[in-house]
Image (cartoon, rainbow, N blue to C red):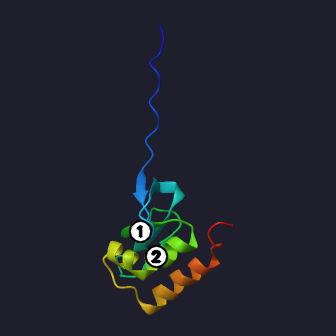
Amino acid sequence: MTRAPRRPRHVPQRTCVGCRTVEGKRALVRVVRTPEGRVEIDPTGKRNGRGAYVHLQRSCWEAALRGGLAHALKAQLSDADRRALEAFAESLATDGL
């Protein structure tokens, strides 16, 4: 008796709020609006709150911080949250390197 071929495993898809490209969830970084209203990076991808996804590319972070991220999270970014996210974006290598 032969077995039926296995179906490929489902890979969750998410859209980068910076460049609007659809990728696998693991290829993106999750940013979360916590129940307390803070906006933080979620390295585990499992924190409680509303999430948005961004590529690990500086250009995507710059575009996301221009307004797409706040819109996706349905929140205004506080100055402290914006500075923390901008510092993370600055730590990324420039695109194409």
Mark 1: few/some/many CA within 10 Å (<14, 14-19, 20+): many
Q: Quadrant of residue 94?
A: bottom right
Residue name at image x 44 percent, y 64 percent = 16
Q: Position of residue 46 (x, y in %)?
A: 45, 62
The foreground one among 92 and 95 is 95
> On residue 63, which mark appears?
2
Q: Earlier in the sequence, mark 2 or mark 1?
A: 1
The foreground one among 62 and 52 is 62
Q: Position of residue 9 (x, y in %)?
A: 46, 38
* Contact check, label 2 and label 1, Cβ < 8 Å: yes
Residue name at image x 34 percent, y 85 percent = 76
Q: Position of residue 89 (x, y in %)?
A: 57, 78
Q: Position of residue 61 (x, y in %)?
A: 51, 74
Residue name at image x 46 percent, y 85 percent = 81
Q: Quadrant of residue 79?
A: bottom left
Work out whether residue 48 can be spotted.
no
Looking at the rendered structure, the kind of residue marked 2 is Ala
Q: Which residue is mark 1?
A: 17
